[in-house]
Image: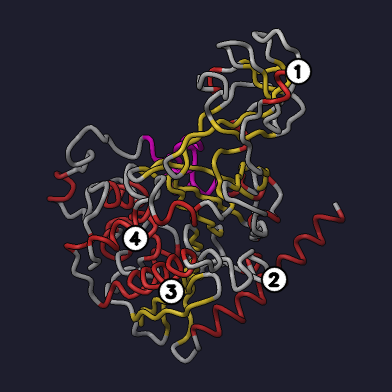
Amino acid sequence: MLSKEDNIRFTEVEPGAALHSMAKRYWLPYLRAEALEANGKSRKVELLGETYISFRAADGTLGFLDEQCPHRGASLVLARSGDNALTCIFHGWKFDVSGKCVETPSEANPNFCKTVKVKTYPVREAGGVCWVYLGEGEPPVFPDYEYFKAPPEYRRARVGYCHSNWTQNLETLLDSSHIGLLHASGAATQAPNIKQAAGINTPKLSVVETPYGLQGYALRDRGDGTVSLRVTEFVAPFTVLNGATREEEGRLLYMVPINNRRAAFWRMEWDLNHTQDYWVEQAKAEGMEELFFEDPDDFLANVFDRTKENYDQDREAMAQGHWSGFKHLRAEDAAVSDSVPMVDRTKENLGASDLVIARMRQQFFRGLEAFENGGPALGLGPRGDGSGIPYADMRGTAELISSDTDPKDFHNRVLREERAAAREAFLAAMETK
């Protein structure tokens, strides 16, 4: 369990919280690129308990700026778009993507606009996603995960909004022990990485700390000379690459705090062996269309009815043997994470199955304290800028291995070497097209 003070330090992200400043030191995803149309409406964005505005100018350039017009504080979400700028509808003050004020028609002095500016933030577009850096000074190295190397037809990005604190779904992603329990009823029809874990509810867990976070290992002895190996890569503090077989899409997952009680859950999936058309057909064949064709701008919007006390849980199905009463894995994870929006961790009783969670929290508190004392932000390596971290080689693992295979060697050497070679071959083939 955590003390009351540590629970606050771990969960709260709004201005004044200990985590607020450190959380601004990372590149954060905030909207899908398709959500911003050139010369279209601006969009309000909330991150870490503060609100901003983002828009795409007519020339395609992204702008990300403080929400309030610096004149009288009207929200620039209401602004007119055009001329590669936003124009506040209150008094016509106009601002370009750099935050420069280019017109103040309500002022007689034409030079007045030169004295006004809206604060803006570094942005970039990558992988079909818009990213922002909210911190002071130079942004860290942009993490070049393999996902970003995949052409658009080989990847997809979606975001869903959790009605709970950012830590809750993050810890679910790091927790391999719940897979055969919470997801028991769907295990026979779920992806291969879930099937491998079915029926063995007490995996042997271990943790390897890394310069960027940690690797969580879960081993399940199947009793037939094979072991189910699941490795979760955690890039502190917001990023997870969880287990996937070589036949599945890789998953790059971000849990971005919106405020103390909401979080954006980003799923960025890619496969250098198959285009997304292939995965559409797979979803249709397995009767899982709703997971593929959900709203990419909020894939959690309709997983269940949030107005009901038990979230549309099918109690009749549970009486007939269905474990959770929810229709699919995504609804199960969302239900347990959102059921208590702010968990009181002073009341927890952690066990051996929570090893990865406990080690992650220990690392978090060490990192936050080091940052407060002038050290680098957690997860950005010894130089504090993300350089030298092998982002491109990271991917979660879910494979069956022989009982005499070293799991750490398998994940760190065999699979990474295979993936690197496959990636280079793929990129070389793409260049010849």
- Residue 281 counted in the magenta span: yes
Secondary element at image label 2: helix
Give the x, y percent position of residue 214: 48, 73
Specify few, some or many for label 4: CA neighbours under 10 Å numbering under 14, 14-19, or 20 or more: many
Residue at the location (40% across, 56% down)?
18
Question: Alpha carbon of mark 2 to alpha carbon of mark 3: how far?
Answer: 21 Å
Cα–Cα span, label 4 and label 2 = 30 Å
Q: Amino acid at mark 1?
A: Asn
Mark found first going from the N terminus, 4 or 1 = 1
Mark 2 lies on residue: 420
Left or right of 278, for residue 363: left
Provide residue 78's location: percent of width, then percent of height.
54, 17
N-term-proximal mark, 1 vs 2: 1
Q: Which residue is mark 1?
A: 111
Of all residues, the one furthest to the bottom in this rendering is 404
Colour scheme = secondary structure
Q: Between tags 1 and 2, which lies in front?
A: 1
Residue visible at 48% across and 34% down in the picture = 51
- Dot 3 corresponds to which residue? 216
In front: label 2 or label 3: 3
Give the magenta part as a residue range. Answer: 279-301
Q: Is residue 216 above or below residue 377?
A: below
